[in-house]
Image (spheres, rainbow, N blue to C red):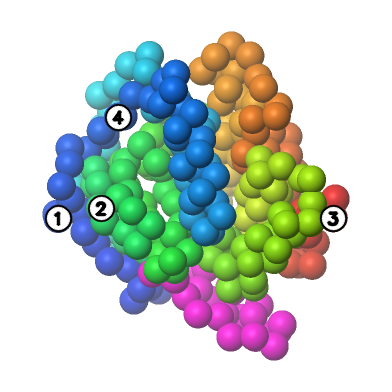
Amino acid sequence: MRWRDQRESDNIEDRRSQSGSELGTRIPIGGKGRVVLFIVVLIAGYYGVDLTGLLNSDVIDLNSTPQNSAEYAVDDPQAAKFTSVILASTEDYWSQDFKRLGKTYIPPKLVLYTGSTQTSCGTGQTFMGPFYCSVDKTVYLDTSFYQEMKQRLGGGGDFAQGYVIAHEIGHHVQNLLGTFNQLKQFKQYSDVSDNQLSVKLELQADCYAGLWGNAVQKQNLLEVGDIEQALNTTEAIGDDRLQRQRDGYVVPDSFTHGTSKQRYAWFKKGFDSGSIEQCDTFTE
């Protein structure tokens, strides 16, 4: 992806030199702890905080062995610059599309950190992966996740990394469009489980990330192999694949983000259509 020499965002805050815990910290959660974790994730989801990745990622597995990966240095300027450029490109796209919808896009802030950082939704930590907090309308990203994608999740490449950021921005778009509040009301009158609603939210965020990818393609910023890398990443982080890698089997009722096939399909649907009207995961 040709991201260098592109506009950078003014809505980024670099806290990496202020982080209070060691990079790559892993918190072992198993047994009763996993039940408590599930409750925490459900409560966070009710308030629009995306922590569902905790339920799938093997970095919180008690039996997971930490690996010595070549993460970005704490103050690596390239990681900050890349993230800032991607954030700016999402701002440009969504500002234009909201205008088409007769709305005004209010960009989120994106905080870079290492290890841990304080948020309005509690303490953000490396093992959570990138996440969006609807309370302070901010995306939080530990830049070591870029290396995590390459070495543990089977994804990589600039466009694939951009997809991850665009996915979190997708949650901000949902927040601005009132999707979170609509789901709270929907829960009161529906038998649909929290997990099923979570999957629909996550797949819609994937579709929204695809819309951003469509805009990037129209600007001729993609290079050979970029689309394939992004699609491979969507498959690599599907619930079924992550569970099979971690446990050797899958439990569909526990899915919170969608299968590899679903994540691939919804990102591609957004990418191919370029239309937000095609991203209604709640009626399909």
Crowd band around label 1 with a 10 angstrom C-alpha radius: few (<14), some (14–19), many (20+): few
Q: What residue is shown at x 29% (from left), y 21% (from top)? A: 66
Residue 57's place in the image compared with 51, above or below, is above
Over which residues does the magenta segment extend?
A: 89-109
Outermost residue to the top: 248
Report whether residue 43 is seen: yes
Q: Are marks 4 and 3 in contact (CB under 8 Å)?
A: no
**At 45% across and 34% down in the image, what residue appears?**
37
- Crowding at dot 2, Cα within 10 Å, few <14 / some 14-19 / many 20+, comes out as many
Q: Reading the chain from its start, which is encountered first: label 2 or label 4?
A: 4
28 or 148: nearer the viewer: 28
The percent position of residue 199, horizontal first and vertical second, equals 67, 44
Q: Quadrant of residue 101?
A: bottom right
Q: Which mark is residue 117?
A: 2
181 relative to 34 in the view: left or right: right
Amino acid beneath label 3: Thr
Which residue type does callout 1 highlight?
A: Gln
- Could you tell me the amino acid type at mark 2? Thr
Q: Which residue is label 1 attached to?
A: 18
- Label 2: element kind: strand
- For label 3, the crowd category at 10 Å Cα-Cα, with few meaning under 14, some 14 to 19 and many 20 or more, is few
Return the residue at label 3.
283
Q: CA distance from mark 2 to mark 1?
A: 8 Å
Tag of residue 26: 4
Percent of width and height locating residue 77: 23, 56
Q: Give the secondary structure at mark 1.
A: helix
Q: CA distance from mark 4 to mark 3?
A: 38 Å
Contact (Cβ within 8 Å) of mark 2 with mark 1:
yes
Earlier residue among tags 4 and 1? 1
